[in-house]
Amino acid sequence: MTRLTTLLIAGACVFWLAGLLEARPALGDGATRPHWQQCGWGGGGFYWACAFHPSRDGVIYVGGDVGGVYKTEDKGRHWRFVNNGLADYAVYSLAVDRSSPDTVYAGTVSGVCKSTDAGEHWEFLEQTGRGTLAITSERGVSVRNIAVDPTDSRTLYAGTPDGRILQSRDGGKSWRKVYESPEAGSISCMALADSEPKLLLAASTLSGVLRSDDAGQTWTTVGTPKDARSVAIAQADANIMYAACGRDGVWKSIDRGKTWAPVSEGIREAASVRDVAVDPQTPDTVYCVGEVGWDGQFYRSLDGGASWQSATLMRRDLDANPTLPADYAYQPAGMCPLSRPTNVAVNPLRTEELFVSGNWRLCFSGDGGESWEERDRGADITCVTDIRFCGGKTYVTAMDEGLLVSDDGGGTWRQLCPLKYDTALSGHQWRVDVRQAGGASRILSTCSPWAEPPNRVLISEDGGQTFAIAREGLPDYRSSANCMWGESYPRALAADPADPNVVYLGMDGDPEPAQDRTGGGVFKSVDGGYTWRQLPSQPGSRRMFYGLVVDPTNSDRFYWGACAEAGGLYRSEDGGGTWQKVFDRETWVFNVAVSPGGVVYCPGKDLWRSTDHGETWQRLTEFGDDLAIVGLETHPTDEDTIWLSRVGWSSRAVGGVYKTTDGGQTWEEITGDLPHRKPTVLRFNEANGELWAGGVGLFNLRQ
């Protein structure tokens, strides 16, 4: 449905370039912490896990690949982030403790986190970390790899991607290995019998289903297909078990897992079944989800798997998730397909209620799977790449989702481009420039489509009603030499403040003479973005991120921030005719800003300032760690007010937002209750005094 790029930039902004050392800044007292308002939309990304609260009707948890954990208290009608204390934002498995209902576990790529207050606060279980036991949950592999003993909260089990099963007898503080076999592949799911908690099942991707009768002390394989993704034991009858076995469909046992047989009549042959769940009260009522390409499949059986009925559509909620409003014209009105479902969960309090996590949209059924409706309002998983304000409106570009606009300060949103899947437009949009032109806004946005290699610029002269595609003068390929993310992306866009028809575009990538490719770098347009030419002279490094800006005091002077070996800050005084490296004290420069008065700010691990166009520099911060400053904003009328955000380039929950009002002499951390603490974009809206932060999710803070 979404044709998300398989790159997804290591998981769609799962935060890149892992390897930098990271340290968490301390937050202030809870009573005085700045309060950030969530102002984005829902949907548009990949949700990998879902689970109902065992005793509070309406409470559901969802885990996403970049957003952490979300919680609803009204069955998905409204969601909010619940990431307080979460160690990592890449969450691929969730498990709830039925005997201690407010206890929930989140499996992340860094290890396991535990909450004892229904997700409101999290604690990282240190022994599960990568540097110790490496009890991690991984993208595409872990389905439900953590399970809690339903009769004893202290006992839980976890499977790992490298074929181990571990047991904890103290609620996750310490663990011991009870199974290990590299030949088993990944242990993707764990399940325990309610009535006999010593009876366990594990799904492995290379050895099929594993079974233990003695609380994990010994294990046997049971004769299912080798690729098992998920297992479920009927709560009402431990003799009945089901397994989701990928392309081999669903298998069933009626003798406590000793023997198994396929029960896939009615399941589409090409479907790869990922998860299976059983009605807690009726063992013959069973559900499963799978995929065919990007399409999703939900199946229900009321006769123990003898036959299955399918559902593939849900009713859309364009108010909650405004993306692709004109897509799916071939479907019944208001409907759209499920896409790549990952988990199916049954409400233990109202067993006719089901929830499915998956790609792009979350969905709920109140009638046992007969019908489905989208429910993801506030479950913001958007990877924001730019924010701009013009004419009382807010414009946002995002990876995968495109360009959206809000007329009411983030209360509601509508899609500008693309309105439906289009090979020429659908993909990542990176930067946007918006200017008032007569009675309408003139919009430029940079774009990297999934399906077609060339990067391009999108232009609207009518406020976003229509868009032209500009490619003339831009490469008809994407460079792969010396690029930040493996290939070239147009992440930088800078218009001349004195002449809006003069626009500069930046993309990474060195020349590749063997392929007759001139690479990326700086491109210039003098007709408002319709045609481009690559500047004949380029900075000493073309590996860049957001770092391109024109000096508002001199249109011939602009700056280019570069990263890695030849990184630093480069300056041109003659419109790009020649370049000089003016800053090399740090070599990872992700951004650059110039104040209205011409003061230059260069971020690395610390922030540096130059009042003489880069000739001399003063360090304004001394953070003392390896986080990178990426978001950077200067106040348009107050030269002493600056905001910055610090980011760790992995999915770890580290980073923060800082502000100075005295030109950098002192700094205040204003991260406050920001639920995703590593925004990569900061923009100040002078019209209403709001600082906006975007990265994963979208938030604003009154200043």
Image (spheres, grey):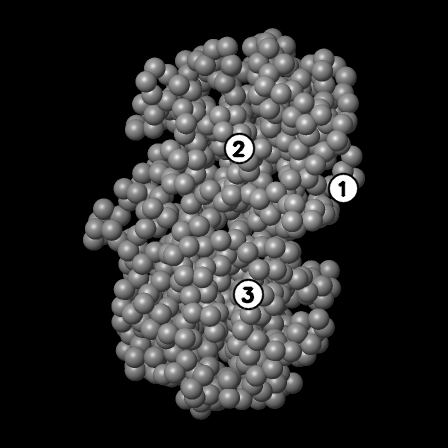
Nearest to N terminus: mark 2 or mark 1:
1
Label 3 vs label 1, nearer the camera: 3
Distance of label 2 from label 1 (alpha carbons) = 29 Å
**Quarter holding residue 555:** top right
Residue 451 locus on image (x, y percent): 39, 40
Q: Amino acid at mark 3?
A: Ala
Residue 675 locus on image (x, y percent): 57, 49
Residue 122 locus on image (x, y percent): 63, 61
- The relative height of residue 538 versus residue 8 in the rendered view (above or below) is above
Q: Amino acid at mark 2?
A: Glu
Answer yes or no: do the residues labelled 3 and 1 have beta carbons within 8 Å?
no
- The relative height of residue 583 versus residue 606 in the rendered view (above or below) is above
Q: Secondary structure at mark 1?
A: loop
Give the residue displayed 72% in from the left and 66% down from the top: 127
Using a 10 Å C-alpha cutoff, classify the residue at mark 1 as few (fewer than 14 neighbours), some (14 to 19) or many (20 or more): some
> Which residue occupies the foreground of this view, 557 or 518?
557
> Which mark is on residue 509?
none
Q: Amino acid at mark 1?
A: Asp
**Quarter holding residue 322:** top left
Residue position for label 1: 625
Q: Looking at this view, name the residue that lies furthest to the front.
A: 31
Residue 366 shows in the view: yes
- The relative height of residue 11 versus residue 224 in the rendered view (above or below) is above
> Which mark is on residue 118?
3
Give the residue displayed 39% in from the left and 65% down from the top: 355
Residue position for label 2: 690
Give the residue displayed 38% in from the left and 33% down from the top: 407
